[in-house]
Amino acid sequence: MATFIISGSRGTDDPTMATLPFMAAKSAKELGHDVVLWLWNEAVILAHKGVADHVTGVNLTPLKELLAAVQAAGVPIWVCGACAVARQIGAGDLVDGASIKGMPDYIKAVAERDRSVAF
């Protein structure tokens, strides 16, 4: 089993790229790996309740379904705190399984994990 931190930076402005980190996190978890999903930049909006309901990438599974699978698998969803503040997103706005984290948390996770995958 490997450990992964998978990060996404794209949001509703690019539905295909926004969906890919969720696909990767779901796939890695299904293969038995330990996964953390890190959302930063525009991707933080995807952790806002209800937003995933309206995101579908080109020829991809709707984000709503991928988010549900990631949540059901217990993958932690970390949301960049500075990025969330810039978009007026608070902890109460987040989907289940998501939490606000800082850059030190991200850097620590990257240092401790076997692999870092960025979208």
Image (cartoon, rainbow, N blue to C red):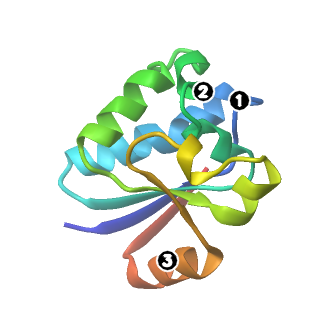
Between the C-alphas of marks 1 and 3, the distance is 25 Å
In the image, 98 versus 41, the foreground residue is 98
Q: Secondary structure at mark 3?
A: helix
In the image, 24 versus 36, the foreground residue is 36
Per the image, the residue denoted by label 3 is 110
Per the image, the residue denoted by label 2 is 51
Numbered label attached to residue 12: 1
- In the image, is 61 to the left or to the right of 49? left
Between the C-alphas of marks 3 and 2, the distance is 27 Å
User: Label 3 sits on what residue type?
Assistant: Val
- Asked where in the image residue 11 lies, by quadrant, the reply is top right
Residue 67 to residue 3: above or below: above
Q: Residue at x 60, y 37 (%)?
A: 46
Q: Secondary structure at mark 2?
A: helix
Q: Residue at x 24, y 44 (%)?
A: 73
Q: Residue furthest front?
A: 92
- Asked where in the image residue 34 lies, by quadrant, the reply is bottom left
Disc nearer the start of the sequence (1/3): 1
